[in-house]
Amino acid sequence: VQLQASGGGLVQPGGSLRLSCVASGISLDYYAIGWFRQAPGNQREGISCITASEGVTWYADSVKGRFTTSRDNAKNTVHLQLDSLKPEDTAQYYCATVCDLYSGGYHYTKRRDESPYWGQGTQVTVSS
């Protein structure tokens, strides 16, 4: 099983990127898929989730209104569209078959009863 995150890069503030999480060995549509990020010296932060069956999406307060996650089941891929990027969005971004984020004062978690799979990170750097 392998999750491959890609699409990161260097972008100016206000710019956009589209991250992709492609899986081999599993079908992503069976899992809720979360995106996480971690900047140096910071804890890992859950930022988005898309559920398996209904495709319901949740977003951390820090990215709500700017980031959008979606599925392409035909390509066994989950995307994260990053718009209106800010320097504080600079981090390593990861996808995983687990969701764990805080939004509007609520803690959202979603996972199968098995150890989650994690992809390697893709670096997003927002700088002028």
Image: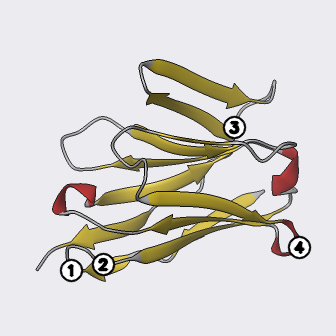
Q: Marks 3/2: CA distance? A: 31 Å
Label pair 2/4, CB-CB below 8 angstroms: no
Q: Residue furthest top?
A: 106
Using the image, tell me which numbered label, if any, was put on residue 116: 3
**Neighbours of disc 4 within 10 Å: few (<14), some (14-19), many (20+):** few
The reply to whether residue 120 is in sight is no
Label pair 3/2, CB-CB below 8 angstroms: no
Q: Residue at x 39, y 69 (%)?
A: 83
Q: In the rendered picture of this protein, how many numbered marks are placed on residues?
A: 4
Using the image, tell me which numbered label, if any, was put on residue 62: none
Label 3 SS: loop
**Neighbours of disc 2 within 10 Å: few (<14), some (14-19), many (20+):** some
Q: Marks 4/3: CA distance? A: 22 Å
Q: Amino acid at mark 3?
A: Pro
The reply to whether residue 22 is in sight is yes
Where residue 65 sits: x, y (%)?
Answer: 43, 53
Where residue 27 sits: x, y (%)?
Answer: 87, 56
Quadrant where the image shows the C terminus: bottom left
Q: Residue furthest front?
A: 65
Q: Classify 96 as above or below 26.
A: above
Residue 94 lies left or right of residue 1; in this view the side is left
Q: Marks 1/4: CA distance? A: 32 Å
Q: Residue at x 72, y 60 (%)?
A: 2
Q: Classify 18 as above or below 79.
A: below
Judging by the rendered image, the residue that carries numbered circle 2 is 15
Judging by the rendered image, the residue that carries numbered circle 4 is 74
Residue 128 lies left or right of residue 2; in this view the side is left
Q: Residue at x 60, y 58 (%)?
A: 69
Label 4 SS: helix
Marked residue nearer the N-terminal end (2 or 4): 2
Look at discs 1 and 3 and give the one toward the viewer: 1
